[in-house]
Structure formats: structure tokens, C-alpha cells
Image: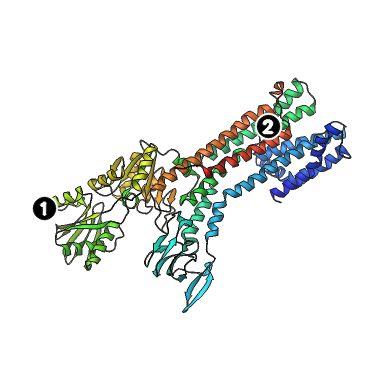
């Protein structure tokens, strides 16, 4: 039976007793059969609506444990059983206490479930984005088929206005595609043959034919949904502390309730019924429901809001880690810069230099290799044959081309090969212009230079400025030479540069920085995986449909460096809201218990068990509402 149905049953059975409670002081009216009728109504409440509390409490007891249901079960059972005793001996009964407490608690839980369902709306909206079917070319015909039947390699036809069903690569046609629903990017993106498209985005202007590259659970949207679901069900480390406190708190409350009864009954000398009411009020008011809601509700809202912004938070631990970050370290290529470098200068015999460089780099996917190969293709230069290919760690690559040992790499190669004075002067000139220089050699000597330049992203400067305004220290880490790296850093305002660092050494440098501060590392999620894992917080920049989910604690779908600022702010706001929720939940109990125990009775301040149940329900609602307000909190 659902919580809502249990609440409705409890409310219907409690209403007659509520009417009597209101009418009796004014008119003297009582329920027919009075005590016996109240007994029958409350028995219905206890047997149907309160039974799950009893069952859970009993299971906890058998496991030598106690939880919030333990307090509810003991409080309501005490009032119910005592009232049966009082009824049989013609004394005042308090059946309504048990019935009203159960009703108010279920009211709170019903409203909590409704509000918590709102916090899961991000998942529902993401699921709603998925296409149901698509037009696929099969056996010379265009067939509309369900999404589940599409396989990698299928040719999918997408008309203007239609939703793209799967991740794919455009093979024919051009169009603009609205990707806002997945990446949060507001401007439509132009797509042409060779470009990648994301499933669930909308084709706007032209006809597209695309080859399916990822289907089912491998699509970007499916990965996002899986990551958000995992994050929303995860637990922040602070929750372990809350659980430990709750394990001590519940038995402590029961002890306080017993002491309350003894003090009122044995010392102050009130009736058994009065002492019992104080004791039951303590048990009910102390029920730590709000503590149990403080973390998961805030986590669900924060993660859901992040998903809408194209910021995927992996789990609750990430939020806690982000709240302590002091230094933000950026990879250069593809993170601070556009990652699309171009060849600007060739020093030496252009054809010979490019032929050797392109032959050495033809199997590499590094942005520098891509720039060299693109230049060679533009000039009609073909790659040759090579053998004995090998990488020189942190320096470059080498192989035998046309029977001669050849190489291409960075300035560190100068320790192995002599550079002529003229080339050395040219190299320094190019480096002063903030260009990356590749030294190309053949037959044990350098024969030329290739200068490559990668420009900073348009958004990098504003992102760094925002981070510095929030007192973050910024560092850029790169394998490029110091001159080029410093020029890029100066252009965007980064505080410190760590240059000439091999990819395998980045994690070690992150660990060195961690000796002085908590470090977040921002990289592409593939080459920088060791550094992302070593940092206190890894932030992986997404790139189209290739998101390395496992690389970082946070994944930025839009590949926009400004989202680093937003991600840190969202994480801190979410974790801050968790702490605020916990604070108010604890304060509520600290204040509520002595009031319920009758400490302030001399000042005319008392709290009946019914009101204690209502107050407890309202405290839980306040925590849920506090978490929901996180969706409206300003991030920048």
C-alpha cells in the first residue's frame, strides 16, 4: 500500500476524533460510544496505516539497531496501549494521540514523496528527450523502426524538424542542429559531412543522412541519464557521520523519554497519563526524519540542475571535494586553447620537412600531428613508408624513412641532436611569437622546423577572471615549451605555468601541488586521465559524443571552460545546502526535545504529542523545500 493511501485511510479514521476534540469544549458533544468508538477507529489506524512503522521497527530491533521508525512505533504504541488500559479502568483515554501522530507523520511523508518526485524531474525530462523510432535504410528501402532495433553502421535519414535518434556521423547533407536539450548550448550548430551528431537533438533546416556510431546504452544521452541516476542515488561522505549520529541519537532519545516520565511521575508527582504524554511527545518530536532527508534531497536537486546545464556530477563525494578546492589546474591543449592548432611556418626545405614529419605523425591523433597532416594534405605532399617507429618519452617520435633515421619532436631533442645556429635563432623567434616548434631531422641532424599555433578559447579569459575573483589559484600544465605556455597563460590571465611536462608526469605534479592546497584538475578526460584521478577533484571536458565518464568526478558536456566556474559553484552550493539542512534538522531536535519534555511548562510553553507529530512532519517538509530552492539559487 502506498504512503498516500495509508495517509488517506488514517485521515478518514482520525477525522471523527478531531471533530469531537473541537466540538466537545464548545457543545459537550461526544462520539457515540466515546472510548469504544475511539478504540475502534484508532485500531484501524494502527493496523493499516501504522503497521509498516511497526514492522520496520521490529526488524531493526531484531538486528540490534534503532531508527526513526523505532521512535514512531514506540511513541504511538505507548499512547495506544495505555489508552486501552485506561478505557478498561474507566480513566481518560488518549487514542486520538496515536491516531493524530500517525496521520501527521504520513501527511509529511506524502508531501515529501511528492516534492522528492519533483527533484527527479531532470531524469524524467532526459528520458522524454529520447526518440522512439527512426527512418533507416535497409535492403534498399527506407524503413521506420523502433530505436531498439537500430544497430551501429545503420544509415539513418533525418528530415528537417525531426529528432535525431542515435549518435552518429553525417555522411550526406548539411543542416543546423539544435543541441540545447542535451548540451545546454543555446545556438544551433552547423553540421556537414564528417561532423558528429548527438541523439535526441533536433535537425532544423536540411536533410541529413548519418551513420549510426553509438546506439542504445552507449549514446551520449543514455550515458548522461545513467550518470545522473547514479549520482542522485549516491551518498556524500558527510552522510556517514549523520548515520553514526542517528545510531546514537535514537537510543539516547528513548533514555530521555524514560527520564522524562520518571521525573514527572515520581518527582513532580503528576498523574500517569500526564507523565506519559510528556514522554510520548519527546519520542515523537525527536524522530530524525529531517536528518534522513537533508542529504539525498539536496543531492538530487543539485545533480538534476547540473544535468540541465550540461554539467554531470558523478556522485556525492564530488560535492564534498569541490567545497574545499583552492587551486584549479588546467591542461592547455583543448582545454584553455581551442585544440585545433594550425601550421603557421615551415623553416627549411618545405617538401622534405613536411614529408618526414607527416610520415612520422600519420598514425597519431595528437592535435599537433593533425595540424601537420592537414598542412601536408593541403600542399599535396604524401606520406612515405617508415620502419622501426618508436616514441621518445617526453620528446617526440622517431623512425627509419628511406633508409635514414628520422625524428620529429620538441626542444628536448636538442640534448640528442645538434641544431644549427640559424635554425636555433629561428626557433627562438617562433617561440617568442607564442608558437609551438616541432624540430624535424633526418640522418642524425635537424633539417627544419615546423611552427604550430593554437589560440586560446574565447571564453577562457573570462572563466579565469571569475575563478580568480573567487580567490582560486590558477595553474596551467602542459608538455609545450615554457615560452609558448607563458604566452597563452598571459593572454588568459593564469597565475602559474608548469611547462615541458610529459603526460605521464602530470599526476606527479598534481601531487606536489596537493602538498599545499586542495587541487582540481581540468583536462580532456583521455590523455589526462592519471592527473584527473590524482587530483582532489577531476573535471573532464566533454567533446561531442566522446565523453570519458570514468575520467573525472565532473564531466562538462559543452567543452566550455566557463562551465568549470559553474560546476564549482553548483557543487559548493549543493554541499552548502546539505550542511544547512543538517544544521536546521539538528537545531530542531535540540530545541524541540526540551520543549516536549515540559522543561518550559513554567513559562506556559508545552507541546502535546499531536503537535509534536505535526511539528516533526513540518520539519521534514522544510528540509525538502530548502533543497528544492537550490534549483533557483544563483550560480554566477
Q: Residues within 10 Å of mark 2 (few under 14, many from 20)?
A: many
Apparent side of residue 264 relative to residue 346 in the rendered image (left or right): right
Q: Is residue 401 above or below residue 451?
A: below
Q: Of the numbered discs in the image, which one, if any, rests on residue 505?
A: none
| Along the line of sight, the residue nearer the viewer: 72 or 124 | 124
Q: Give the image location of residue 455, x and y in percent.
A: 29, 52
Element assignment for label 2: helix
Q: Residue at x 69, y 48 (%)?
A: 3
Q: Residues within 10 Å of mark 1 (few under 14, many from 20)?
A: few
Mark-to-mark CA distance, 1 and 2: 87 Å
Count of number-bearing discs: 2
Q: Residue at x 29, y 48 (%)?
A: 478
Apparent side of residue 171 relative to residue 268 in the rendered image (left or right): left
Q: Which residue is mark 1?
A: 422
Q: Nearer the viewer, mark 1 or mark 2?
A: 1
Q: Is residue 254 above or below residue 150?
A: above
Q: Residue at x 26, y 58 (%)?
A: 342
| Along the line of sight, the residue nearer the viewer: 46 or 558 | 558
* Quadrant position of residue 269: top right
Q: Give the image location of residue 619, x and y in percent.
A: 63, 37
Q: Is residue 235 visible?
A: no
In what quadrant of the picture does the C terminus appear? Answer: top left
Q: Of the numbered discs in the image, which one, if any, rests on residue 254?
A: 2
Amino acid at each position: 500500500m502506498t504512503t498516500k493511501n495509508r495517509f488517506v485511510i488514517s485521515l478518514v479514521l482520525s477525522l471523527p476524533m478531531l471533530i469531537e476534540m473541537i466540538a466537545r469544549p464548545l457543545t459537550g458533544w461526544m462520539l457515540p460510544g466515546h472510548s469504544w468508538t475511539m478504540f475502534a477507529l484508532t485500531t484501524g489506524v494502527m493496523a493499516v496505516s501504522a503497521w509498516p512503522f511497526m514492522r520496520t521497527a521490529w526488524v531493526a530491533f531484531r538486528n540490534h539497531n534503532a531508527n526513526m521508525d523505532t521512535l514512531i512505533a514506540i511513541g504511538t504504541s505507548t499512547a495506544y496501549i495505555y489508552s486501552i488500559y485506561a478505557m478498561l479502568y474507566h480513566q481518560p483515554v488518549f487514542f486520538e494521540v496515536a491516531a493524530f501522530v500517525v496521520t501527521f507523520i504520513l501527511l509529511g511523508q506524502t508531501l515529501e514523496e511528492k516534492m522528492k518526485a519533483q527533484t527527479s524531474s531532470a531524469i524524467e525530462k532526459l528520458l522524454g528527450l529520447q526518440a522512439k523510432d527512426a527512418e533507416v535504410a535497409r535492403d534498399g528501402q527506407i524503413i521506420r523502426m523502433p530505436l531498439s532495433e537500430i544497430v551501429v553502421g545503420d544509415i539513418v535519414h533525418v528530415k528537417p524538424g525531426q529528432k535525431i535518434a542515435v549518435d552518429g556521423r553525417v555522411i550526406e547533407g548539411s543542416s543546423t542542429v539544435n543541441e540545447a536539450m542535451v548540451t545546454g548550448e543555446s545556438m544551433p550548430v552547423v553540421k556537414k559531412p564528417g561532423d558528429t551528431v548527438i541523439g535526441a537533438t533536433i535537425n532544423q533546416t536540411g536533410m541529413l543522412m548519418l551513420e549510426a556510431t553509438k546506439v542504445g546504452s552507449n549514446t551520449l544521452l543514455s550515458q548522461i541519464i545513467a550518470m545522473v541516476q547514479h549520482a542522485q542515488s549516491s551518498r556524500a561522505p558527510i552522510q556517514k557521520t549523520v548515520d553514526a549520529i542517528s545510531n546514537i541519537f535514537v537510543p539516547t532519545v528513548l533514555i530521555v523519554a524514560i527520564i522524562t516520565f520518571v521525573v514527572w511521575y515520581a518527582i513532580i508527582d503528576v498523574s500517569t497519563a500526564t507523565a506519559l504524554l510528556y514522554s510520548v511527545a519527546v519520542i515523537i518530536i525527536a524522530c530524525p526524519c529531517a536528518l534522513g532527508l537533508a542529504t539525498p534531497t539536496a543531492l538530487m536537486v543539485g545533480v538534476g540542475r547540473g544535468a540541465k546545464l550540461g554539467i554531470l556530477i558523478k556522485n556525492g563525494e564530488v560535492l564534498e571535494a569541490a567545497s574545499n578546492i583552492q587551486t584549479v589546474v588546467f591542461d592547455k591543449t583543448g582545454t584553455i586553447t581551442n585544440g585545433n592548432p594550425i601550421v603557421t611556418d615551415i623553416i627549411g626545405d618545405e617538401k622534405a620537412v613536411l614529408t618526414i614529419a607527416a610520415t612520422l605523425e600519420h598514425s597519431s591523433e595528437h592535435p599537433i600531428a593533425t595540424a601537420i597532416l592537414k598542412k601536408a594534405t593541403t600542399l599535396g605532399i604524401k606520406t612515405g613508408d617508415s620502419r622501426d617507429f618508436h616514441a621518445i618519452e617526453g620528446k617526440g617520435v622517431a623512425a627509419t624513412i628511406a633508409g635514414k633515421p628520422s625524428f620529429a619532436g620538441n626542444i628536448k631533442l636538442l640534448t640528442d641532436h645538434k641544431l644549427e645556429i640559424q635554425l636555433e635563432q629561428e626557433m627562438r623567434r617562433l617561440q617568442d611569437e607564442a608558437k609551438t616548434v616541432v624540430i624535424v631531422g633526418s640522418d642524425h641532424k635537424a633539417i627544419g622546423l615546423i611552427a604550430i599555433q593554437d589560440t586560446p578559447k574565447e571564453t577562457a579569459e573570462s572563466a579565469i577572471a571569475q575563478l580568480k575573483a573567487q580567490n582560486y589559484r590558477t595553474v596551467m600544465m602542459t608538455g609545450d615549451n615554457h615560452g609558448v605556455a607563458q604566452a597563452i597563460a598571459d593572454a588568459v590571465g593564469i597565475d602559474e605555468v608548469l611547462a615541458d611536462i610529459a603526460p605521464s608526469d602530470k599526476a606527479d605534479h598534481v601531487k606536489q601541488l596537493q602538498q599545499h592546497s586542495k587541487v582540481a584538475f581540468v583536462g580532456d578526460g583521455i590523455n589526462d586521465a592519471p592527473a584527473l584521478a590524482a587530483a582532489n577533484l577531476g573535471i573532464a571536458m566533454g567533446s561531442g559524443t566522446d565523453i570519458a565518464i570514468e575520467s573525472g568526478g565532473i564531466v562538462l558536456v559543452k567543452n566550455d571552460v566557463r562551465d568549470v566556474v559553474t560546476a564549482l559553484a553548483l557543487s559548493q552550493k549543493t554541499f552548502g545546502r546539505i550542511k544547512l539542512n543538517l544544521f536546521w534538522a539538528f537545531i530542531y531536535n535540540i530545541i524541540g526535545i526540551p520543549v516536549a519534555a515540559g522543561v518550559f511548562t513554567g513559562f506556559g510553553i508545552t507541546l502535546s504529542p499531536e503537535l509534536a507529530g505535526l511539528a516533526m512532519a513540518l520539519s521534514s517538509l522544510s528540509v525538502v523545500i530548502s533543497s528544492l530552492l537550490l534549483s533557483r539559487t544563483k550560480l554566477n
